[in-house]
Amino acid sequence: MAPVNRRYDLVVRGARVLVDGAFRPCSVAVAGGEVVALDALDAAVAAVEVVELAADEVLLPGLVDTHVHVNEPGRTEWEGFASATKAAAAGGVTTLLDMPLNSIPPTTDVAALETKRASTQGQCAVDVGFWGGAVPSSLGTLREMHEAGVYGFKCFVLDSGAPEFPPLTHIQVEEAMCEVAQFDGLLAVHAEDAAVIDSRRVPHTVHYREFLDSRPPEAETVAVDAVIEAARRSGARAHIVHLSSARAVPALASARAEGVAITVETCPHYLTLTAEEIADGQTQYKCCPPIRDSVNQDLLWEALAAGHIDFVVSDHSPSTPDLKMLDEGDFGAAWGGVSSLQLGLPLVWTEARRRGLDLATVVGWMSARPADIVGVHRKGRITVGSDADLVVFAPDDTFTVDPETLHHRHTITPYTGRELTGVVRTTYLRGRSALQPVPQGTLKRTGGPRHG
């Protein structure tokens, strides 16, 4: 209940507000940047600003995207904090975590972390936190980065594509896990096995089928099995990023059932695009691991619905247009990455709705669940004491993807011309519009208990 006679900064009233996983009529009262009361829809409250949702609008918590490659400093021509966070805000994402590559320097020590933080100044439209990098040279120093505030550590077990961010061997992955287990840290792994990939590598091809065959499901299942075993032996928390192959799900589900602390994410492109629709030369679809067939996609959706996959994040991985090699159409040589930071919610909601899934479940996958697992506190829920990160969303409205409306630095997208359902109409960051002329985003640091 709201305290009598209190005047709030903002009150948002709506017949459908997502609270505790369900929609209900509610007035959300905001003061000092946080949610301070949840009241009846017709509660008599006073506020500087009162927003009445339209009949076709719902109120959601701000999304939490824990997998974004911003690339600044060093490769700011690929993206950058100003463009990435503006795209995030336009897409209802109010908190993002920046991956430790492909910036230069990569975030593999405390000095590089401070360089990264300095590069954000005056640029962030949303709140931003950081992953650290687990590379051979950073082993033994991960606690230092953890204490400096990174949310976890990202590693590869094959060539990352960035020479300044080398992979770990499977033995080194377990060493990293033993290290992070000492402070309840989190190790996130790009799980494609180097030996499997090297045995199937295709340096140049315009044929998507050849590229897909060069990164088979076995590359993921072999690597996931190794990560599971390392997590089992070390007792560490492990996380599989951007799962593409549903064949890895049974092993993950089995390991979790026995108590192994392993979680897993997937991405909008794996849930909404299929290999069957990718024509030869269309390198805007290239990502690693790759977009697989429709049967595999159905199984990913089943795993999400069953709770075997924990959440959905963008893996927003942009580059300059020349690196996508659109003119040559060379899947072997083109940079791998799909830019979807601004489109994630309508992409996933459009497909989920078609499959009979509800919006509350979808939003949970993209807000509370990533926030809880990675430890991004006060985010991902509309609840008293949380940051007032709110999204006004029209779930039945439609739009057609026009690259010119995207705020990403480069507007290359495989979604051009696709009709999507669900429009983000307003995004609030701590109770204020997230798309103000003066950016209001702050830098986040890990700390405190986790949930989930």
Image (spheres, rainbow, N blue to C red):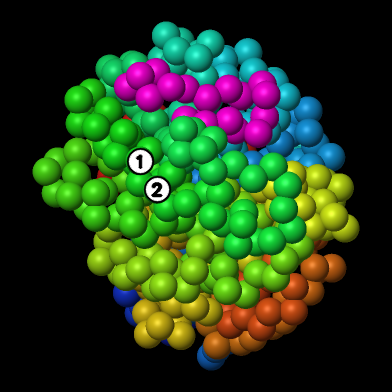
User: Which residue, as the protein is rendered here, is positioned at the far front?
Assistant: 199
Residue 159 position within the rendered picture, expressed as x and y whole percent measured from the top left = 58, 30
Q: Which residues are magenta?
A: 156-174
Marker disc for residue 218:
2
Query: Which residue is at the front of the view, 47 or 447?
Result: 447
Few, some or many residues within 10 Å of mark 2 (<14, 14–19, 20+): some
Q: Which residue is mark 1?
A: 222
* Residue 190 visible here: no
Quadrant in the picture for residue 71: top right
**SS at mark 1?**
helix
Crowding near pointer 1: few (<14 within 10 Å), some, many (20+)? Answer: some
The residue lying toward the viewer, choosing from 269 and 393, is 269
- Tag 1: amino acid: Val
The residue at 29%/18% (across/down) is 178
Tell me residue 174's x, y (percent). Answer: 32, 22
Where residue 302 sits: x, y (%)? Answer: 32, 70
